[in-house]
Amino acid sequence: MYVTAVKANGYKNLKNAVISPHPEYNLITGMNAQGKTNLLEAIWLMTGCRSFRGSKDRDYISIDGNIMELGMAFYDGRRTQKIEYSMSRENIRDKKIKLNGVSIKGTNGLFDCFKAVVFTPDDTELIKGSPEKRRTFIDLCCCQLNGRCLDSVRRYDLLLNHRNTLLKSIAAGKAQRDSIYVWDQQIAAIGTFISVKRNEYVKKMNETCQNLYSRITGGKEILTIEYNSNIFGSQIPEGNDGNDAVAKYFMKLNGSIDDDIRLGYTLWGAHRDDLIIKINGMNIKEFGSQGQKKTAALVMKLGQAEIYFKKSAEAPVILLDDVMGELDESRQALVFETVKNMQVFITACNENAVKGLANGAVFRVENGEVTAMQER
């Protein structure tokens, strides 16, 4: 999979930006606050995901503008596809999205079409941040491989919100206690499915990331990634144990109803799960150095790309935002070795920040305007 054309106008500070990317490496240079990351972010939005910087929809539109327009063409291994994406300040919620000239409702329709992996300096939060960061990451990874996971995650969130609202109503005497069981049955079924799929993915990631991390450290440090379920602990059921697992999940919910009513939220479930990441048996979040945390986050993102490539036989597009300058030569070499058959977009203040680039194009961004410089 690779991008063949990108257009962005009115997206943050980008002004009539048009590029024809190289199918291998694309180095985007420029000083800070000129729009390099905005260009990567525009590409990322074509995955159907929200901004990797946490931007609100209203922030997509230029401060002095009223309309944001994005366009992208990409080859998916079989054919060239085209995405058009626009929105106006007058009606932020009404996104106009077309796939191959056909209007689609919302961003959901993009998720199965274009795949990318993004790595930013903030991704160390995968290691040192909250469990929610790690759950969100694993859910994204699972959803890239299995479209049913996306529907399940969204359905689970909806059911959980309904349950929490009902808990408050029960506490206020506005609803009957027994009314919660119908929600618990649905949550137990979907929550078990999510836990099983997450665990299956984490097993793949553990194996892949162990290999990547070992190549950096020369085998001196062993990275392990385990899925820890709030319901099942480390004994996550396999797919054929579904009925017993759902029953166990339901019993956990049922057993905590009194506490849940008192607190007004749900104590047990897939929304409380976490990843346990260790180096040589020690929890990296508590005992790891900053260098170890950065390296672990890097190999998790590289692992995401490698797993998708192996599973789908189609390479995702790689977006590296201002991270190469922070990596030493051995880590840069690992990145290039892992993504050698993938299209890569790299932002950096100057060309010297990135070592070892082979075939590719160089673009310069200045005050929101993009200029093609040369091919390497």
Image: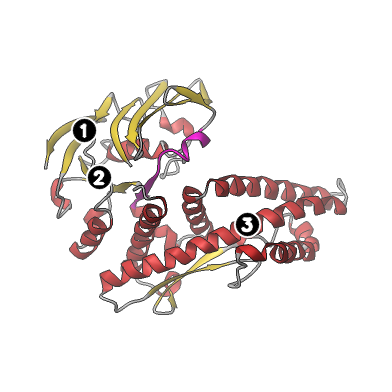
Q: Please say whether residue 17 is one of the residues in the magenta stretch.
A: no
Q: Which secondary structure lies at badge 3?
A: helix
Quarter holding the N terminus is top left
Say if 181 sits above or below 6 in the image.
Answer: below
Image: 345 above or below 105: below
Q: Which amino acid, by three-letter code, is at mark 2?
A: Thr
| Camera-side mark, 3 or 2 | 3
Question: Does residue 175 appear left or right of residue 92 in this picture?
Answer: right
What residue would you read off at disc 3?
Answer: 193
For label 3, count other residues whose C-alpha is less than 10 Å away and answer few (under 14), some (14-19) or many (20+): many
- Residue drawn at x 43%, y 79% as measured from the top left: 281
| The C terminus - image quarter | top left
Residue at position x 25%, y 42% in the image: 32
Q: Nearer the viewer, mark 3 or mark 1?
A: 3
Q: Give the residue type that dot 1 points to.
A: Glu
Q: Secondary structure at mark 1?
A: strand
Whether residue 118 is in magenta: the answer is yes
Image position, residue 188 (x, y; %): 71, 57
* Residue beneath disc 1: 366
Q: Which residues are magenta?
A: 107-120
Under mark 3, the amino acid is Phe
* Total labels drawn: 3
Mark 3 or mark 1, which has the lower sequence index? 3
How far separated are the C-alphas under marks 3 and 1?
47 Å
Of the numbered discs in the image, which one, if any, rests on residue 347? 2
Q: Earlier in the sequence, mark 3 or mark 2?
A: 3
Q: Earlier in the sequence, mark 1 or mark 2?
A: 2
Q: Percent from the top left, x then y, of residue 16? A: 28, 23
Foreground disc of the pair 1, 2: 2
Q: CA distance from mark 3 to mark 2?
A: 38 Å
